[in-house]
Amino acid sequence: MNLKLLRFLVVSLAAAMSLTALAAVLAQLTQTGTETAASSFLSRTALAQTAPKAKNVVLVHGLFADGSSWSEVIPRLQAAGLNVTSVQNPLTTLPEAVDAALRVLGRQNGPTVLAGHSFSGMIVTEAGVHPNVSALVYVAARAPDAGEDYAALAKQFPTPPASAGIVFDGDEGRLSEEAFLRDFAGDLPEAKARALFAVQWPFHKALLTGKTTHAAWRSKPSWYAVSTEDRTINPDLQRFMAKRMGAKTIEVKASHVSLISQPETIANLILEAAR
């Protein structure tokens, strides 16, 4: 790569990105050495700089949970003056889950941050192309490319312990109590984790077969919170997805449910995406 162009990129990106995200960008530029890569990153930076200030936040939930999983984050966003909606997205099929999010996004008046936890990163990735969406936030979440087989991607990394704790009753799957307390919500007080276990939504097998047809992170500025102690989605898989999308990334020493154990950190990340 031309040395002058590299210097320009360092100065420009440093002004617009976190140190973690900047390091990821420079690493990829060094590896590729192509002006195409430089152009791609400049384009994403421009998106982040020009994204309109959002007044709305739409939250989607993952497996083994419902919309109340965001209950510790919601009051913090509301206190900052944001209009917040937590979608009770079904866990039946991916198209049905995406449709539920799209209906809520269609009701928003103006720029909206779309944030998802865990499996619902699939919903964020697909529904995030909605014109009302100004930014995307992934919290220990799946972030596939368009048409990508997420299961095949995940197999490139060590299988997380929670996978062994999924039990099925016919078509419906859920986490066993032991796996929920240890591998899903391991950093929560036991009483809190047991209460969350009691209200977990079962998911249908068909939900896991869905593939995204869009990758909103390719055209929308994105943020990602990696849970470093995650036993549900491998932390290195999270890092891979965050780096691939060029997301502004933070690492949180938390279990899979950082939105519950560290809501202030997650709320601040969403507020950053809204600005």
Image (cartoon, rainbow, N blue to C red):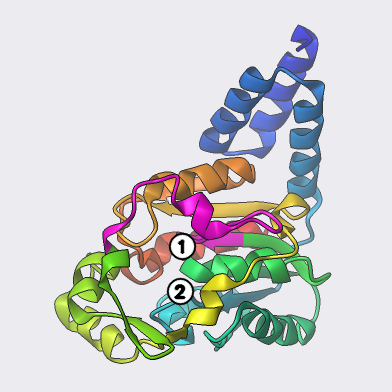
Name the residue at 61% across, 42% down: 244
Q: Is residue 152 left or right of residue 37?
A: left
* Residue drawn at the location 30% of the way across and 84% of the way down: 196
Q: Amino acid at mark 1?
A: Ile
156 horizontally vs 97: left or right: left
The reply to whether dot 1 and dot 2 touch (C-beta < 8 Å) is: yes
In the picture, residue 146 is in which quadrant? bottom right
Query: Observer-nearest residue: 217 or 83?
Result: 217
Using the numbered discs, state the Cα–Cα distance from disc 1 to disc 2 in whole angstroms.
Answer: 7 Å
Q: Which residue is mark 2?
A: 73
Residue 230 in which image quadrant: bottom left
- Give the x, y percent position of residue 30: 63, 18
Q: Amino acid at mark 2?
A: Val
- Residue under label 1: 266
In reply to whether residue 145 is colored magenta, the answer given is yes
Which residues are the magenta region?
137-161
The residue shown at (31%, 52%) is 253
Horizontal arrangement in the rendering, residue 91 relative to residue 109 (left or right): left
